[in-house]
Image (cartoon, rainbow, N blue to C red):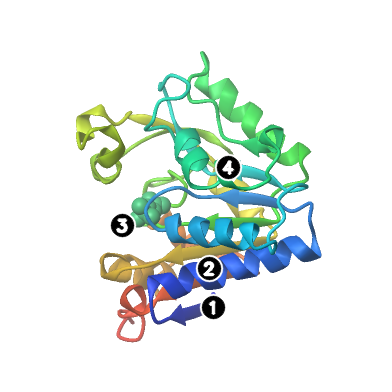
């Protein structure tokens, strides 16, 4: 069973995970981290920035690989995940910019870019810790529910609900959200030595219960974490509330 930690609030989830990561960086400054975007990790990044300013989180030797990026946005587009990471983390900590990686969404050949990205993760020695959010439909990275899932980093089509969930950075218009993304594959994610999934808020309660207590299925991509030997899920009470009743 996946190791599950439940905190009383989303803020406590953020603080606990940030502290854990700061401690991991103290033990192994050269960590290779897989990083998420979205609403959930924002307070965690805020806490990490604060820990960095207080001298408790040193990123100078760390390497980061984000889980995904939209296809087709020009460099510097405010809706890109590169821009998100710049705003929430990269601009505020001592990460070497050459060590921060996201797929190049503007690449002329997105498939070739996906293969290059996967190879770059391998060349860095793989991910030490993959930090994940979970989509309301159970996606991890941008691996949407399907009959089968790409093992390695690939070009994926985004579901309408996923595009709607990302509309805020596109003037509130889901139609402006790109239809494709480059996402780490589920095999790439599950090859991480540790996987840490964060979920907060009542709107994640159903999918969290399905992913943790339901069958392992590509129809709920996060359920594949049940196969990982060192996966942990960190929840607030609202996101955990369906866990006990689920069978
Ligand atoms: P959210 O997204 O944190 O914005 O809910 C999570 C995800 O889609 O992986």
Nearer-N-terminus badge (3/4): 4
Residue at 55% over, 73% down:
16
Question: How dense is the environment of label 1, judged by Cα within 10 Å: few (below 14), some, or many (20 and up)?
Answer: few
Residue topped by disc 4: 90
Residue at 56% over, 68% down:
17
Residue topped by disc 2: 226
Q: Helix, strand, or loop for circle 4? A: helix
Residue 135 placement: quadrant: bottom left
- Of the numbered discs in the image, which one, if any, rests on residue 1? 1
Q: Are marks 3 and 1 in contact (CB under 8 Å)?
A: no
Q: Are marks 1 and 4 in contact (CB under 8 Å)?
A: no
Q: How far apart, in angstroms, are the residues tagged by discs 2 and 4? A: 31 Å
Nearer-N-terminus badge (2/4): 4
In the displayed structure, does residue 52 sit left or right of residue 125? Answer: left
Q: Is mark 3 within 8 Å of ligand 1?
A: yes
Residue 98, compared with residue 194, is above or below; it is above
Residue 214 placement: quadrant: bottom left
Q: Is mark 2 within 8 Å of ligand 1?
A: no
Of badges 3 and 4, nearer the viewer stands 4
Residue at 62% over, 42% down:
65
Q: Are marks 1 and 2 in contact (CB under 8 Å)?
A: yes
Q: How far apart, in angstroms, are the residues tagged by discs 3 and 4? A: 27 Å
Q: How far apart, in angstroms, are the residues tagged by discs 3 and 2? A: 18 Å
Residue topped by disc 3: 136
Nearer-N-terminus badge (3/2): 3
Numbered label tally:
4
Residue extending furthest toward the top: 108
* Nearer-the-camera pick, 100 or 111: 100
């Amino acid at each position: 069973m996946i190791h599950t930690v439940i905190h009383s609030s989303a803020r406590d989830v953020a603080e606990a995970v940030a502290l854990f990561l700061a401690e991991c960086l103290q033990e192994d400054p050269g960590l290779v981290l897989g990083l998420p975007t979205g609403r959930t990790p924002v307070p965690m990044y805020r806490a990490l920035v604060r820990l960095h300013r207080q001298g408790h989180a040193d990123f100078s030797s760390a390497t980061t690989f984000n889980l995904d990026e939209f296809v087709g946005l020009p460099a510097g587009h405010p809706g890109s995940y590169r821009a998100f990471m710049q705003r929430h983390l990269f601009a505020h900590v001592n990460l070497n910019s050459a060590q921060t990686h996201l797929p190049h969404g503007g690449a002329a050949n997105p498939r070739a870019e996906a293969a290059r990205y996967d190879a770059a993760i391998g060349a860095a020695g793989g991910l030490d810790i993959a930090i994940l959010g979970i989509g309301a439909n159970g996606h991890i990275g941008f691996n949407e529910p399907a009959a089968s899932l790409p093992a390695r980093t690939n070009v994926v089509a985004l579901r309408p609900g996923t595009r709607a969930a990302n509309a805020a950075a596109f003037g509130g218009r889901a139609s402006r959200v790109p239809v494709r993304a480059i996402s780490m594959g589920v095999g790439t994610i599950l090859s991480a030595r540790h996987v840490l999934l964060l979920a907060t808020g009542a709107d994640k309660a159903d999918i969290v219960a399905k992913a943790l207590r339901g069958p392992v299925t590509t129809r709920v991509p996060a359920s594949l974490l049940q196969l990982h030997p060192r996966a942990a899920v960190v929840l607030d009470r609202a996101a955990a509330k369906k866990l006990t009743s689920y069978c």
